[in-house]
Image (spheres, rainbow, N blue to C red):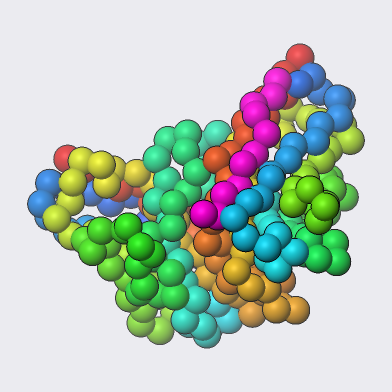
Amino acid sequence: EVQLVQSGAEVKKPGEPQKISCKASGYNFPNYWIGWVRQMPGKGLEWMGIVNPDDSDTRYSPSFQGQVTISADKSSSTAYLQWTSLKASDTAMYFCARLAYCSSTSCLPPDYWGQGALVTVSS
Amino acid sequence: QSALTQPPSASGSPGQSVTISCTGTSIDVGGYNYVSWYQQHPGKAPKLMIYEVSKRPSGVPDRFSGSKSGNTASLTVSGLQAEDEADYYCSSYAGSNNRGVFGTGTTVTVV
Protein backbone atom coordinates (compact mmCIF):
# COMPACT_ATOMS: atom_id res chain seq x y z
CA GLU A 1 0.00 0.00 0.00
CA VAL A 2 1.37 3.39 -1.03
CA GLN A 3 1.63 5.78 1.90
CA LEU A 4 3.02 9.27 2.36
CA VAL A 5 3.32 10.12 6.06
CA GLN A 6 4.11 13.72 6.94
CA SER A 7 5.59 15.18 10.08
CA GLY A 8 3.28 16.75 12.62
CA ALA A 9 1.82 20.19 13.14
CA GLU A 10 4.22 22.94 14.17
CA VAL A 11 3.85 26.33 15.83
CA LYS A 12 6.80 28.60 15.12
CA LYS A 13 7.77 32.23 15.56
CA PRO A 14 8.56 34.61 12.68
CA GLY A 15 12.19 34.36 11.65
CA GLU A 16 12.61 30.77 12.83
CA PRO A 17 13.76 28.04 10.45
CA GLN A 18 11.55 25.03 9.73
CA LYS A 19 11.83 21.71 7.95
CA ILE A 20 8.90 19.36 7.40
CA SER A 21 9.12 15.83 6.07
CA CYS A 22 7.19 13.35 3.97
CA LYS A 23 8.14 9.67 4.36
CA ALA A 24 7.12 7.36 1.55
CA SER A 25 6.44 3.63 1.72
CA GLY A 26 4.84 0.93 -0.37
CA TYR A 27 6.60 1.77 -3.63
CA ASN A 28 10.05 2.38 -5.10
CA PHE A 29 10.69 5.94 -3.88
CA PRO A 30 13.26 6.96 -6.56
CA ASN A 31 10.83 6.13 -9.38
CA TYR A 32 8.30 8.91 -8.69
CA TRP A 33 8.58 12.65 -8.35
CA ILE A 34 7.26 14.21 -5.14
CA GLY A 35 5.53 17.58 -5.10
CA TRP A 36 4.72 20.04 -2.32
CA VAL A 37 1.39 21.88 -2.26
CA ARG A 38 0.42 24.84 -0.09
CA GLN A 39 -3.12 25.47 1.09
CA MET A 40 -3.57 28.72 2.98
CA PRO A 41 -6.53 28.97 5.36
CA GLY A 42 -9.77 28.91 3.39
CA LYS A 43 -7.96 28.92 0.06
CA GLY A 44 -7.18 26.54 -2.80
CA LEU A 45 -4.27 24.29 -3.71
CA GLU A 46 -1.01 25.85 -4.97
CA TRP A 47 2.00 24.04 -6.37
CA MET A 48 5.20 25.03 -4.58
CA GLY A 49 7.63 22.76 -6.40
CA ILE A 50 8.62 19.22 -7.17
CA VAL A 51 11.67 16.99 -6.67
CA ASN A 52 12.93 13.88 -8.43
CA PRO A 53 14.19 11.64 -5.61
CA ASP A 54 16.40 9.70 -8.01
CA ASP A 55 18.69 12.58 -8.94
CA SER A 56 17.39 15.44 -6.72
CA ASP A 57 16.37 17.48 -9.78
CA THR A 58 14.10 20.21 -8.40
CA ARG A 59 11.62 22.56 -10.06
CA TYR A 60 10.02 25.48 -8.24
CA SER A 61 6.92 27.52 -8.98
CA PRO A 62 7.95 31.14 -9.59
CA SER A 63 6.13 32.32 -6.46
CA PHE A 64 8.18 30.02 -4.25
CA GLN A 65 11.60 30.16 -5.95
CA GLY A 66 14.10 31.41 -3.39
CA GLN A 67 11.53 31.22 -0.57
CA VAL A 68 11.76 27.50 0.23
CA THR A 69 14.05 24.56 -0.43
CA ILE A 70 12.73 21.19 -1.55
CA SER A 71 14.89 18.08 -1.26
CA ALA A 72 14.74 14.29 -1.05
CA ASP A 73 16.80 11.54 0.55
CA LYS A 74 16.70 8.22 -1.28
CA SER A 75 18.25 6.34 1.61
CA SER A 76 15.35 7.15 3.92
CA SER A 77 12.60 7.48 1.27
CA THR A 78 11.83 10.95 2.61
CA ALA A 79 11.16 14.29 0.94
CA TYR A 80 11.59 17.61 2.71
CA LEU A 81 10.33 21.18 2.54
CA GLN A 82 12.28 23.80 4.44
CA TRP A 83 12.38 27.49 5.22
CA THR A 84 15.34 29.46 6.57
CA SER A 85 13.20 32.23 8.04
CA LEU A 86 9.45 31.83 8.45
CA LYS A 87 6.96 34.67 8.01
CA ALA A 88 3.42 34.96 9.35
CA SER A 89 2.21 34.61 5.76
CA ASP A 90 3.70 31.08 5.65
CA THR A 91 0.89 29.92 7.96
CA ALA A 92 -0.80 27.17 5.96
CA MET A 93 -1.38 23.46 5.52
CA TYR A 94 1.34 21.82 3.46
CA PHE A 95 0.77 18.59 1.55
CA CYS A 96 3.23 16.31 -0.19
CA ALA A 97 1.96 14.34 -3.16
CA ARG A 98 3.29 11.62 -5.46
CA LEU A 99 3.42 12.31 -9.17
CA ALA A 100 3.09 9.25 -11.38
CA TYR A 101 5.10 10.80 -14.22
CA CYS A 102 6.89 14.03 -15.08
CA SER A 103 8.23 15.00 -18.49
CA SER A 104 10.63 17.85 -19.11
CA THR A 105 7.65 20.19 -19.43
CA SER A 106 4.96 19.02 -17.01
CA CYS A 107 3.69 16.34 -14.65
CA LEU A 108 0.64 14.15 -14.41
CA PRO A 109 -1.70 15.14 -11.56
CA PRO A 110 -0.90 13.56 -8.17
CA ASP A 111 -2.14 10.07 -7.40
CA TYR A 112 -1.31 9.84 -3.68
CA TRP A 113 -1.21 12.51 -0.99
CA GLY A 114 0.24 12.88 2.48
CA GLN A 115 -2.11 13.74 5.32
CA GLY A 116 -0.87 17.33 5.51
CA ALA A 117 1.23 19.31 7.98
CA LEU A 118 -0.16 22.50 9.51
CA VAL A 119 2.48 25.15 10.03
CA THR A 120 1.40 28.10 12.15
CA VAL A 121 3.70 31.12 12.35
CA SER A 122 2.84 33.56 15.10
CA SER A 123 4.68 35.81 17.49
CA GLN B 1 0.40 29.50 -15.94
CA SER B 2 -3.03 30.45 -14.55
CA ALA B 3 -5.16 28.15 -12.44
CA LEU B 4 -7.96 26.25 -14.13
CA THR B 5 -11.34 27.95 -13.68
CA GLN B 6 -14.03 26.28 -11.57
CA PRO B 7 -17.29 27.74 -10.26
CA PRO B 8 -16.90 28.72 -6.59
CA SER B 9 -19.93 26.75 -5.49
CA ALA B 10 -22.53 24.20 -6.53
CA SER B 11 -25.39 22.59 -4.68
CA GLY B 12 -28.03 19.93 -4.93
CA SER B 13 -30.54 18.03 -2.85
CA PRO B 14 -29.95 14.47 -1.69
CA GLY B 15 -30.46 12.09 -4.59
CA GLN B 16 -30.00 14.77 -7.23
CA SER B 17 -27.00 15.29 -9.51
CA VAL B 18 -24.49 18.11 -9.58
CA THR B 19 -21.94 18.86 -12.30
CA ILE B 20 -18.78 20.90 -11.77
CA SER B 21 -16.84 22.39 -14.68
CA CYS B 22 -13.10 22.94 -14.99
CA THR B 23 -12.08 25.26 -17.81
CA GLY B 24 -8.54 25.57 -19.09
CA THR B 25 -6.85 26.08 -22.42
CA SER B 26 -5.45 24.07 -25.29
CA ILE B 27 -2.11 23.70 -23.49
CA ASP B 28 -3.62 21.98 -20.47
CA VAL B 29 -7.16 20.54 -20.27
CA GLY B 30 -7.77 20.72 -24.01
CA GLY B 31 -4.41 19.32 -25.03
CA TYR B 32 -4.20 16.15 -22.94
CA ASN B 33 -6.43 13.45 -21.47
CA TYR B 34 -4.77 13.86 -18.10
CA VAL B 35 -7.36 15.56 -15.93
CA SER B 36 -7.89 14.42 -12.36
CA TRP B 37 -10.50 15.38 -9.77
CA TYR B 38 -10.03 15.48 -6.00
CA GLN B 39 -12.46 15.61 -3.10
CA GLN B 40 -11.33 17.43 0.03
CA HIS B 41 -13.15 17.50 3.34
CA PRO B 42 -12.21 20.22 5.87
CA GLY B 43 -8.83 19.63 7.45
CA LYS B 44 -8.17 16.55 5.34
CA ALA B 45 -5.95 15.69 2.41
CA PRO B 46 -7.36 15.73 -1.12
CA LYS B 47 -8.64 12.33 -2.25
CA LEU B 48 -8.34 11.19 -5.87
CA MET B 49 -11.82 10.61 -7.32
CA ILE B 50 -11.21 10.63 -11.10
CA TYR B 51 -8.04 10.34 -13.17
CA GLU B 52 -7.33 10.48 -16.91
CA VAL B 53 -10.59 12.40 -17.44
CA SER B 54 -13.03 9.59 -16.65
CA LYS B 55 -11.35 6.71 -14.82
CA ARG B 56 -12.27 5.89 -11.22
CA PRO B 57 -9.72 4.55 -8.73
CA SER B 58 -10.69 1.42 -6.87
CA GLY B 59 -13.10 2.20 -4.05
CA VAL B 60 -14.59 5.38 -5.53
CA PRO B 61 -18.37 5.00 -5.99
CA ASP B 62 -19.66 4.94 -9.55
CA ARG B 63 -21.84 7.92 -8.62
CA PHE B 64 -18.75 9.96 -9.55
CA SER B 65 -18.05 10.36 -13.26
CA GLY B 66 -15.84 12.55 -15.39
CA SER B 67 -15.86 13.82 -18.95
CA LYS B 68 -14.21 16.38 -21.19
CA SER B 69 -15.18 18.52 -24.16
CA GLY B 70 -12.64 20.81 -25.72
CA ASN B 71 -10.94 22.90 -23.04
CA THR B 72 -13.50 22.06 -20.33
CA ALA B 73 -13.57 19.00 -18.10
CA SER B 74 -16.55 18.11 -15.91
CA LEU B 75 -17.19 16.09 -12.78
CA THR B 76 -20.72 14.80 -12.18
CA VAL B 77 -21.86 13.49 -8.83
CA SER B 78 -25.10 11.55 -9.17
CA GLY B 79 -27.39 10.49 -6.35
CA LEU B 80 -25.97 13.14 -4.02
CA GLN B 81 -25.35 12.04 -0.46
CA ALA B 82 -24.58 14.09 2.63
CA GLU B 83 -20.98 12.85 2.68
CA ASP B 84 -20.42 14.30 -0.82
CA GLU B 85 -20.46 17.78 0.72
CA ALA B 86 -16.84 18.88 0.27
CA ASP B 87 -14.48 20.96 -1.83
CA TYR B 88 -13.59 19.58 -5.26
CA TYR B 89 -10.48 20.44 -7.27
CA CYS B 90 -9.50 19.55 -10.80
CA SER B 91 -5.90 19.22 -11.97
CA SER B 92 -4.36 18.80 -15.38
CA TYR B 93 -1.12 18.06 -17.12
CA ALA B 94 -0.01 21.42 -18.53
CA GLY B 95 2.42 21.44 -21.38
CA SER B 96 4.51 24.41 -20.39
CA ASN B 97 4.82 25.01 -16.65
CA ASN B 98 6.92 21.95 -15.64
CA ARG B 99 4.60 20.74 -12.86
CA GLY B 100 0.91 20.74 -13.83
CA VAL B 101 -1.91 23.01 -12.72
CA PHE B 102 -4.81 22.95 -10.22
CA GLY B 103 -8.31 24.33 -10.53
CA THR B 104 -9.62 27.11 -8.32
CA GLY B 105 -11.87 24.74 -6.38
CA THR B 106 -15.64 24.28 -6.00
CA THR B 107 -17.55 23.89 -2.75
CA VAL B 108 -20.39 21.41 -3.14
CA THR B 109 -23.25 21.78 -0.69
CA VAL B 110 -25.94 19.16 -0.19
CA VAL B 111 -29.03 21.15 0.74
Give the extent of the magenta segment: A1-11
Q: Which residue is drawn at 43% across and 69% down?
A: B51
Q: Nearer the viewer, residue A56 or B37?
A: A56
Q: Is residue B93 visible?
A: yes
Can you tell which quarter of the image residue A97 is in? bottom right
Can you tell which quarter of the image residue B23 is in? bottom left
Q: In which quarter of the image is the C terminus of chain B?
A: top left
Q: Which residue is drawn at 62% across and 41% down?
A: A5
How far across and how far down the image is residue A112, in percent?
54, 56
Q: Quadrant of the N terminus of chain B?
A: bottom right
Most extreme residue toward the left is B15
Q: Is residue B2 visible?
A: no
Q: Residue at x 32, y 65 (%)?
A: B75
Instruction: Tell whether position B39 is magenta.
Output: no
Q: Residue at x 89, y 35 (%)?
A: A84
Q: Left or right of B38: which side holds A71?
A: right
Q: Left or right of B55: which side holds A81?
A: right
Q: Nearer the viewer, residue A28 or B72?
A: A28
How far across and how far down the image is residue A19, in percent?
80, 36
Q: Which of A20 and B104 is in front in this view?
A: A20
Instruction: Tell whether position A10 is magenta.
Output: yes
How far across and how far down the image is residue A98, in percent?
62, 59
Q: In this view, does A95 lie above or below B52?
A: above
Q: In this view, does A18 lie above or below B107?
A: above
How many tags in the picture?
0
How far across and how far down the image is residue A70, in percent?
81, 51
